[in-house]
Amino acid sequence: MSTAEFIKAQTQILERFGVEATSRFINVPLLAGKAHVLVSGDGPPVMMVIGGGMVAAMWAPLMAQLKGFTLYAVDLPGNGLSDPTTYRTATLRTTGVGFLEQVQEGLGLEQSPFIAQSMGGLWSTWLALDRPGRVSAISYIGCPALILGTSAPFLLRFSTLSWVTALLERLDPPSLKRVDRVAAMAGEDLRTMPELRRLFLESSKLPASGSQLLSLHRAAVRIRGAQPAVALTPSQLQRLTQPVQLIWGENDSFGPPSVGRQAADMIPDAEIHVVGGGHGPWFSQHEMVGWLLTRFLDANTRDMPVEKIEPGSGSDRPEPRIRHED
């Protein structure tokens, strides 16, 4: 039942913002399963990689602003409708790089720009470093995970302790009130978008959601901060050869705009824009973020081939119907 309710909530958020999308399931050998990708629009391909604990359909307010591109919004392993994996600190980088590369291969993409947020930003950076031919440009929306000494809010790090997790599961089960608290912790207020709140709630009720998010958090952070082995360092940023755009929420609790400015100074080809909002600034600032992104993508997709979507390709699993029709 929880999966059916999630698909219903996914459909509602896409319809709220007028996004016509097709659901595709891509074979990913690394998962021994499939990754779920929302495909929308026509034009040069653009990958959209959201953070841990969130789902691809949460990009809907921003997807509605990005005209003239084929958008591929992917659920990370164990999030949304993507199959789960095992997250470990020692293999988190190979998991992130392998997952994104295999999704691109399954979609028939040799190269594309990336729009990325939080953990999606960290994984996209690793892909750009380890497989530079796969990534033509990156736009970070919000603070990339573990960049330049950042970590996560203390309460999130505290919840990675086993006894805290067990206590929260018993005393604080999924609810709209919990959604609002998590959003506030990230510097966001979702109460004016009931469809987005409902999607967030239903995603947290999916069978693998809680255990996968806990596994990912433990692989990435500890009570004292980021796991050193997976932190995003100055030397890594300095090696990026792709054009980079940073769009930073002024109230991002995962890292303040000053961190974004430091990163922009280190990356050879980078621009930074500070907007309203927090860790998901496109929720409240989708028009501004969409305008900034469109300019950046136009400049970095001029010579790329136009993608032609073939509905239903790349999947042998029945697709939930989420195409909006008049």
Image: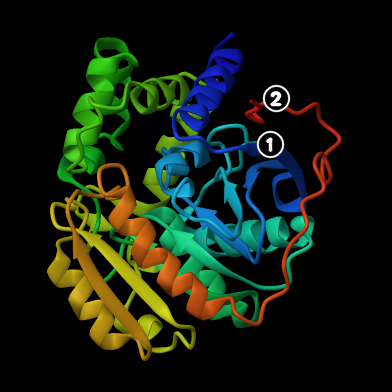
At horizontal 78% and vertical 57% (from top left) the residue drawn is 308
What is the x, y in percent for residue 183? 24, 34
Q: Is residue 241 left or right of residue 131?
A: left
On the question of residue 268 being in view, the answer is yes
Determine crowd level at label 1: few under 14, some 14-19, many 20+ residues with C-alpha closer than 10 A. Answer: many
Residues at marks 2 and 1 touching, judged by CB atoms closer than 8 Å: yes
On the question of residue 167 being in view, the answer is no
Please name the colour scheme applied to the rendered image: rainbow
Q: Is residue 320 above or below residue 22?
A: above
> Tag 1, which secondary structure?
strand
> Tag 2, which secondary structure?
loop
Q: Give the farthest residue toward the front.
A: 326
Q: Amino acid at mark 2?
A: Pro
Rendered image quadrant of residue 70: bottom right
Q: Is residue 208 left or right of residue 308?
A: left
Q: Is residue 261 above or below residue 120?
A: below
Task: Answer with mark 2 or mark 1, whichever residue precedes in sequence.
Answer: 1
What is the x, y in percent for residue 153? 18, 46
- Residue nearest the observer in this picture, 150 or 81: 81
Looking at the image, how many numbered discs can be counted on the residues?
Answer: 2
Quadrant where the C terminus sits is top right
At horizontal 82% and vertical 39% (from top left) the residue drawn is 312
Mark 2 lies on residue: 320
Mark 1 lies on residue: 23
- Residue nearest the observer in this picture, 156 or 1: 1
**Label 2 to label 1: alpha-carbon separation:** 7 Å
Q: Amino acid at mark 1?
A: Ser
Q: Is residue 235 above or below residue 27?
A: below
- Residue nearest the observer in this picture, 301 or 255: 301
Quadrant where the N terminus sits is top right
